[in-house]
Image (cartoon, rainbow, N blue to C red):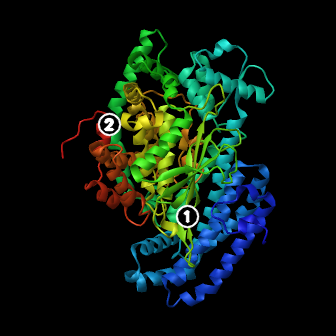
Amino acid sequence: MNDNPLLQPWVLPPYDAIRPEHVVPAITHVLEANLRQLAGFLPGQLAHPTFAGLMQPLEDMHQRLLNVEQTIYRLANDADEAFAEQYQQCNERLQSYQLALRHNNSLHGALLRLQQVAAGDLDPTQRAALELALRDARLAGIGFDAALQRRQLQIEHHLDLQYRQYGYNLTQAQGAWTRHVSDASALAGASPAMLFTLAENARLQGRDGWLITLEFPQVQALLQQLHNRQLREEIYRAWHFQACTPPWDNAPVVREVLRLRSELATLSGHAHYASRAMVTRMFDSHEEVESFLLELIAQIRPVAIEELDELTELAEWVGAPPLQPWDLDYYQEKYCQAHYGFTDRALRQFFPLTQVLEGVQALTLRLFHVELLPRPDVPVWHSDVLVYELIEGGESLGHLYFDLLARADKRPGAWMEALCDRHRFADGRLQLPAALLSCELLGGSELYPTSLGLRELKSLLHEFGHGLQHVLTRVDYGSVAGGKGLAEDAIEFTSTLFEQWALLPDSLVLFSGASNSAAVSQAVTAESRFSAMDFLQQLQLALLDYRLHARSDAFDPAELAQAVLAPVEVLGTPAYVQHIQRFAHLFSSDEYAGGYYTYVWSRVLAEHLFQRFRREGVLSAEAGMQLRELILAPGGTRPVADLIESFTRSRPDSQALLQTFGIATPVR
């Protein structure tokens, strides 16, 4: 074991030294060591528990395992199949360990005893960590009889298998579809950079011409650019029909997941899963969530209809057929070109990736007095990955890994992944945090360097917000550091907040380096022209998620989806569009189940908080430092509403959000 790099002390994971044969021995060693440690300290903590004797070693155990597992997970998901195969061998053992720990009645009894006898002696961070551990135990079924606990264990295990199957089906379905184009005229309207990408797709498969895949950046760009309406429809259909037919049909998986979640809720005494989900959320009841969503839909939908009317008029003026969903992005581009003189393609000239990253560095320094310095010497899992260290006054605060380009062997989408948490071990050693920020920008070339549109800039800043929350925390217990321990319907709050810096000319100048700020300002106005339609789609999906999980009877998920979405949509969608079969947020894990509305609620919170920057200056160092100290630093140790009120001196409401859509609100 001494030569296994996964078991050596490190500041950052030694990705370049780890081999597939290191995986199983490392996981086995840590699991066995943790169980021995638990057996060693738990008996002595049952009668007279202390935080140092009970919670501290539990936190340390979790961090040791998390460091090894997360490092392997990263390699298994973005290196080669050998790592994935080795990690797969450990999955059942890892799950059994986690479930056994969560369902340990003796451990739960000791935690309860600690809360009873020592709560007044604990500092706020320790209390938060203890309360989180007890909450998770309650959700795991601790306190119910043995038969119910066994059934809950079985359900959780089966759900995990279903989540994996759902993700596998999506991956296989996406990779199975391509569209070869041999006639260049069919691709009229596509940008030179896009044509280059499609030609590279074909070349890599030994073909001439151009090859369209279902990588999202390609789909998004082609729906926006192609004059060929028939080809746009074909791409739209392929994208929305993923995982809808055998052998990768996700419909049976969705039905089984919903059935299991319903049973899980019933076991824990809840009417349905939506009610159970409220245990970890800011809202007190699922009824409040539905009222919140319906109220916003009623206010936003008329604005979205007005936006659609503008596009319809344009399409009629040029003699186009009645608008369909695959026409929307295309005519939005045409509208912006006609009314503002800008298209997404033209806007990209302002945002080359190298300049955007320099802007991210400048924003961090201006707001937080923290330097973001490149670290090309740090080992990475792929040559695309860039590493930056956050430095304040010569002191390291942690690291951010930027993996921004799309590639065939990489998980699609944009996300932040915690690589290691900030945590102080019992021996006093401080482990600094590190996070991965992943996006799927189209890879560039010498001829066509990678550049960003405003949507992609917002996406990058969204993940950057997640990353800063993870790294700028000052909490020393990993379970409540960064975004961990926050109410789960506010987990997207800080990331949504950072999108705001992609929407104002004063801050956009940092990312563009453009001397013509008026042009950038005009481009921002054009980009936000159809924002109500985009936000209404988020509201629709949030309502769909809520309704899917607010029932305990048997029902057809596809029929319910149609019944929920049809009255809200401003432009109907074809019957073949099955959102739930490619709704990975809901069905590839339980993180957003019954809580997809977090994207809507987080937008409310972010707009409310950002009003202070609008008043004091979007690059105000004073507001930035208070954002860091009052919002980012506390991690999950205080209620989110209290954090926001400490920064804004007011309780959060929807007024600022509605004003962004031009909806008048009463003066407070």
Q: Residue 250 sits in which quadrant?
A: top right
Nearer to us of marks 2 and 1 is 1
Residue identifier under label 1: 432
What secondary structure is found at the residue carrying circle 2?
Answer: helix
Q: Which mark is residue 99?
A: none
Question: Tag 1: Cα neighbours inside 10 Å, few (<14), some, or many (≥20)?
Answer: many
Question: Tag 2: Cα neighbours inside 10 Å, few (<14), some, or many (≥20)?
Answer: few
Q: Residue 640 sits in which quadrant?
A: bottom left
Q: Vertically, is 180 above or below 54?
A: above
Q: Earlier in the sequence, mark 2 or mark 1?
A: 1
Seen from the viewer's position, the closer of residues 27 and 364 is: 364
What secondary structure is found at the residue carrying circle 1?
Answer: loop
CA distance separating discs 2 and 1? 38 Å
Residue at position x 44%, y 64% in the image: 636
Seen from the viewer's position, the closer of residues 651 and 168 is: 651
**Type of amino acid at the residue the image marks with label 1:** Leu
Q: Vertically, is 544 above or below 35?
A: above
Q: Residue 384 sits in which quadrant?
A: top right
Question: Farthest residue in the front direction?
Answer: 394
- Badges 2 and 1: C-beta atoms under 8 Å apart? no
Q: Is residue 470 visible?
A: no
Tell me: 87 left or right of 597.
Answer: right
Residue at position x 48%, y 24% in the image: 328
**Type of amino acid at the residue the image marks with label 2:** Thr
Tell me: 165 left or right of 639.
Answer: right
Residue at position x 41%, y 63% in the image: 634
Q: Quadrant of the N terminus?
A: bottom right
Q: Which mark is residue 660?
A: 2
Tell me: 60 left or right of 270.
Answer: right
